[in-house]
Image (cartoon, grey):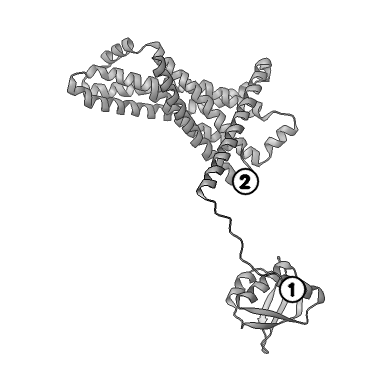
């Protein structure tokens, strides 16, 4: 079939030829905008018209309506003439715009979506807990190679960025403290400042935020891609539990890696504080470590490690949960990956704030 074509004849009529179908129109929907016709009835010669479907009839009718014209068919096959008349009987209207919702309705929709997502997260946590209990009853089902590989990716490979960031934070904390403490002759208390700040707050929090952006996003992207490529459906068809295969190794690996990364961040941050204390306050390494060993008790370190364990569970669960919520396309993978990072960091900060309130009430 020939492609669609429309030409003006010498007698003022318009000659249609070719195939006016969705496949034969080509660029004619755009080209028709450059053609002008008079208002009123227009003679349309369909002698050379090969085929037409509803798409072609709609394009032709829209062109006529834009010039306040109407069709006057001549030499049209009866079947195509009936189609043109049917399309002409319906007004050519612009595409409807999505309705605009008011502030109250948008707030309600957002609240309902947040509630639905919270319920889905609770259900996902329950499934992970059940899978974990099943793994405890049958330890041989644990995929140790995947666990060790995940520890390497989430823990060992993150050491450089965790160490550098913690070192610089230790430098900043000691520098800001030195500016204030030197005015009161309390230089030695910079040790307490760096120790408590790094061990209780900054080391576990900064490590968790970096891991949320690094590993949490990777979890969501990996699982989301598997959802889009229907690998998750294939696992369920083969009676393989996706949570046991994909979630539990990541959860256990991060629960092991993040506390160890927090200890490494403690060491790097305290070392940064030692360097700054020596250069700004004249406190030597030996004096710094002596004061640090006296003032920093074991519970201070354990508080930071305990917080990091909770942060690890939050990051792993949120990353995997958002990955499983991917639907249909690569765009959804990117959207859920972004959500996993945002929600992971937000919930880590919320958990850290709750820890601070509880510790204050308990006098810890």
Badge 1 is on which residue? Answer: 84
Question: Depth check: 209 or 130 in front?
Answer: 130
Q: Measured from the top left, where is residue 214 in percent x and y?
A: 49, 33
How busy is the neighbourhood of tag 2: few (under 14 within 10 Å), some, or many (20 plus)?
A: few
Q: Secondary structure at mark 2?
A: loop
Residue name at image x 72 percent, y 77 percent? 17
Residue name at image x 47 percent, y 26 percent? 351
Q: CA distance from mark 2 to mark 1?
A: 38 Å
Q: Is residue 2 visible?
A: no
Q: Residue furthest bottom?
A: 11
Looking at the image, tell me whether mark 2 or mark 1 is earlier in sequence order.
Answer: 1
Q: Is residue 276 visible?
A: yes
Q: Residue furthest front?
A: 104
Q: Measured from the top left, where is residue 62 in percent x and y?
A: 64, 72
Q: Measured from the top left, where is residue 343 in percent x and y?
A: 50, 35
Quarter of the picture holding the C terminus? top left
Quarter of the picture holding the N terminus? bottom right
* Rendered position, 22 above or below 276: below
Q: Secondary structure at mark 1?
A: helix
Badge 2 is on which residue? Answer: 329
Q: Measured from the top left, where is residue 188 in percent x and y?
A: 24, 17
Q: Which mark is residue 70?
A: none
């Amino acid at each position: 079939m020939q492609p669609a074509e429309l030409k003006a004849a010498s007698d003022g009529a318009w000659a249609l030829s070719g195939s006016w179908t969705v496949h034969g129109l080509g660029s004619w929907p755009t080209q028709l905008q450059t053609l002008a016709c008079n208002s009123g009835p227009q003679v349309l010669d369909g002698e050379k018209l090969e085929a037409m479907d509803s798409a072609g009839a709609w394009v032709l009718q829209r062109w006529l309506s834009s010039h306040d014209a109407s069709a006057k068919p001549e030499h049209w096959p009866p079947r195509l003439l009936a189609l043109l008349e049917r399309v002409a009987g319906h007004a050519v209207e612009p595409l409807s715009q999505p309705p605009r919702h008011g502030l109250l309705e948008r707030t309600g929709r957002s609240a309902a979506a947040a509630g639905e997502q919270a319920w889905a997260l609770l259900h996902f946590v329950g499934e992970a807990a059940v899978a974990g209990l099943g793994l405890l009853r049958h330890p041989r089902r644990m995929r140790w190679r995947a666990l060790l590989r995940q520890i390497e990716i989430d823990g060992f490979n993150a050491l450089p960025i965790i160490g550098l960031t913690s070192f610089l934070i230790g430098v900043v904390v000691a520098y800001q403290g030195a500016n204030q403490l030197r005015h009161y002759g309390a230089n030695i208390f910079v040790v307490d400042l760096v120790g408590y700040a790094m061990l209780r707050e900054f080391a576990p929090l900064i490590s968790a935020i970096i891991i949320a952006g690094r590993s949490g996003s990777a979890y969501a992207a990996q699982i989301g891609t598997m959802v889009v490529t229907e690998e998750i459906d294939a696992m369920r068809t083969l009676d393989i539990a996706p949570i046991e295969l994909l979630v539990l190794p990541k959860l256990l690996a991060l629960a092991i890696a993040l506390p160890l990364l927090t200890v490494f961040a403690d060491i790097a941050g305290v070392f940064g504080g030692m360097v700054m204390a020596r250069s700004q306050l004249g406190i030597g390494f030996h004096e710094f470590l002596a004061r640090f060993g006296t003032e920093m008790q074991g519970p201070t370190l354990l508080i930071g490690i305990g917080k990091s364990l909770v942060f690890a569970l939050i990051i792993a669960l949120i990353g995997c949960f958002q990955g499983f919520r991917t639907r249909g396309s690569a765009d959804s993978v990117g959207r859920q990956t972004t959500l996993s990072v945002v929600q992971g960091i937000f919930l880590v900060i919320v958990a850290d704030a709750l820890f601070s309130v509880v510790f204050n009430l308990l006098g810890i």
